[in-house]
Image (tube, rainbow, N blue to C red):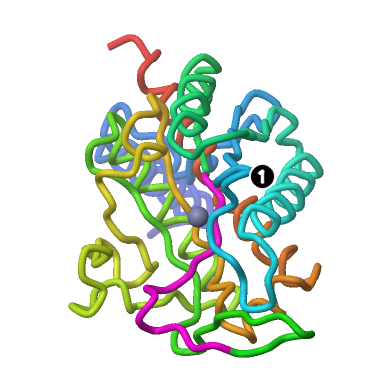
Amino acid sequence: MITNSDFVRRLRFHAVALLVSAVCAAPANAQPKTTPPAPQCDASKFHLILDVGHTPEIPGAISARGDTEYNFNLRLANVIKHKLEEAGFVRTTLLLGTGEAIPSLVRRVSQANAMSADLLLSIHHDSVPQVFKSKWNYEGKDLEYSDRFKGHSIFVSKDNVNYQRSLAFAQLLGGRLKARGMQYTPHYTESFMGSRRRMLLDAENGVYRFDQLVILRTPQTPAVLLEAASIVNRDEELLMGKEEHQLQIAGAVTEAVDKFCAQNMTRTAKATTPR
Ligand SMILES: [Zn+2]
């Protein structure tokens, strides 16, 4: 006959036995399963160089309505810088050049290398080969335009010493622009682009390979070039004049920089962890 107290005693024994076997079955070093915290970016330490493409004297492309590419580059770079600073990226430097194109470029790269920054982003606005341009008169001025292509494009050089990290940032940036409904232009892969034809490295995020560019090839930091839009396209030129659109691009850059910075923190942590 099993009494109530016997029954309770046996029950307790089985419960303890079950607990012991469960503990013994688990590996000795088992830890409770927790997701490791996502790496955080220390924005105050991250140094970004924003290179403003071209110079006031040699200003690059001329827009459909007669403004210079340099002015577009400078306006957008300032908006991006402000947005980054708001997000805590206070070590954001505008890199400005003057005078002739090539000497200015060489000087800017040497200044960038002296700063040992974490990332260089060169800001440009696009045009098209002459063959695609048409003439029109805008406010009494004879100008050229092409509405055939529109959209941004992103370039990296395989010759940059930090090619993989350049590509990583370019893909982050392309992804953030896409998330805001912006489409890259696919026309750089077309044979009609001739010497300006480029290899598309990432069809999802609109990243092209452009090895020869000095501003991408020679910096010691990861380097990426953004053609923010085609300013010979009459609609896109107007779009790029709107602060709201500039802020959208600046927001995409800031998010991409934040993610890239967090990846950088992970790299640094791994590099300094004793093995
Ligand atoms: Zn340019």
> Residue drawn at (43%, 35%), measured in percent from left and top?
102
- The kind of residue tagged 1 is Pro
> Residue drawn at (43%, 46%), measured in percent from left and top?
224
Range drawn in magenta: 122-135
Q: In the image, 163: left or right of 52?
A: left
Residue situated in front as seen by the camera: 34 or 273: 273
Badge 1 element: loop
Q: Quadrant of residue 217?
A: top left
Q: How many dots with numbers?
A: 1
Q: Position of residue 212 (x, y in %)?
A: 26, 44
Query: In the displayed structure, would residue 46 be above or below residue 61?
Result: above
Residue situated in front as seen by the camera: 229 or 101: 101
Query: In the displayed structure, would residue 212 be above or below residue 187?
Result: above
Quadrant placement of the C terminus = top left
Magenta region includes residue 126: yes
Q: In the image, 113: left or right of 243?
A: left
> Residue drawn at (72%, 86%), measured in percent from left and top?
138
Q: Is residue 243 visible?
A: yes
> Residue drawn at (79%, 45%), measured in percent from left and top?
82
Q: Which residue is mark 1?
A: 56
